Amino acid sequence: MQDDGARRPWSLLRLLACLTALSPAGCGHVIPIATSFRGETGVTADANLRGAVEVRMTPLEMKLPAAADPGEMVAKIVRPGHGAGPHPRIALVDVDGLLLNQNYGHLYAVGDNPLASLRDKLEAAARDPQVVAVVLRINSPGGSVTACDVMAEELRRFKAETQRPLVACLMDVATSGAYLLAAESDRIIAHPTGLTGGLGVVFNHFNLQDAMAQLNVTADPVKSGPRIDMGTVAAPLDDETRTMIQKMADAYRAHLQRRVRQRRAAMTAQDQQAVADGRVLLASQALERHLVDRLGYVHDAIAEAERQANVAGAEVVLFHRAGYPAHSVYAIAPSPAPLSEAIPLSYPGLDRSRLPTFLYLWQPDPTLPRPGAR
């Protein structure tokens, strides 16, 4: 019979192996552990002696907890009103990050869909009889054509149904599809150091043919028609396909610019021509081209909303999920990092869940920005 001292090193080895599997370092990360242990009896066991010693690992079963629901939209007071209450309210609605029609969540929490989140916030503001105006605080480079267009339409419907003023406050970036949302506002106030404009379209195509060849991967599709896979990453765009996709991109751009023209009556033909190539602008340049009405800060946008609603001393509330903290006018309703954040590799074209896509997006980086990144 083997004494306890001789068995103890192998029990320790088993424990360390299990801890390694459960390590927060994640898949593909190895935590170095010692390969030699000495028991109290002086018996040494070396894990490198393969074949001489058999170590049996008991299978470990893990059950992850169900994702938590962050709750309904609630109003959090982030600036108290002045004087005796009850006070009129200015609703602060934030639009933040990449605007795609998909949920941004992780293993332990249900993430928001930007489109659904905006709709929920607007509905919460509409139901609150104290809300007299809305400040739409935007910090986003844009997103997919359809998601941005639907979000802009939701803002238009909110204004038509509630008849409440809507003021946009543009933060670091409010370009392309995000600017389309701002254009639905009665007034647009841009942070002096912000960027806006970018009234164009990107079709985020990547040619991975050479990368696939290095991995000895060859595309061999069975197709019912020669154009059914147009835009595939497995081959470069031929001239005819490029022409077809270019026409679609031009049509989307025309839709974007037409909608902006309808909302921004102050823009002249010269202004429209100056930004027709999709360039982004400093806030001061956007003011000159009538894309924004004035430069200012969040508090200026709140004051403008009070003027539009003909009230003073209003309290400011941020609509957010009940499970998320909010304590100031700069708080955001955060989306948890997506599951893809567990993979540090970022290679253009590898994330097929978002390719190919027509985007109202300022995209200087060839990799599509990761949702949930703040």
Image: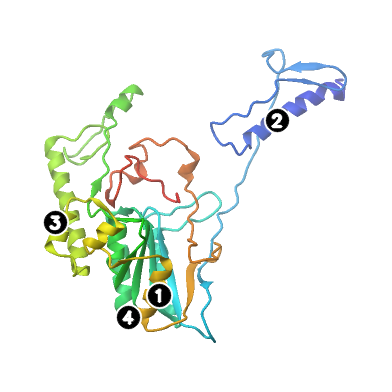
The amino acid type, in three-letter code, at marker 2 is: Leu
Mark closer to the observer (2, 1)? 1
Mark closer to the observer (4, 2)? 4
Kindly identify which residue carries mark 3: 273
Mark closer to the observer (3, 2)? 3
Please tell me which of labels 4 and 3 falls first in the chain: 4
Please tell me how crowded label 3 is: few (under 14), some (14-19), or many (20+) other residues with Cα within 10 Å: few
Please tell me how crowded label 4 is: few (under 14), some (14-19), or many (20+) other residues with Cα within 10 Å: few
- Please tell me whether mark 4 sits on a helix, a strand or a loop: loop
The amino acid type, in three-letter code, at marker 3 is: Gln
Q: Residue 133 is drawn in which quadrant?
A: bottom left
Label 4 and label 1: CA atoms lie apart by 18 Å
- Please tell me whether mark 2 sits on a helix, a strand or a loop: helix
Kindly identify which residue carries mark 4: 163
Q: Residue 116 is drawn in which quadrant?
A: bottom left
The amino acid type, in three-letter code, at marker 4 is: Gln
Label 3 and label 2: CA atoms lie apart by 66 Å
Kindly identify which residue carries mark 1: 303
**Residue at the (14%, 65%) spot, across then down:** 268
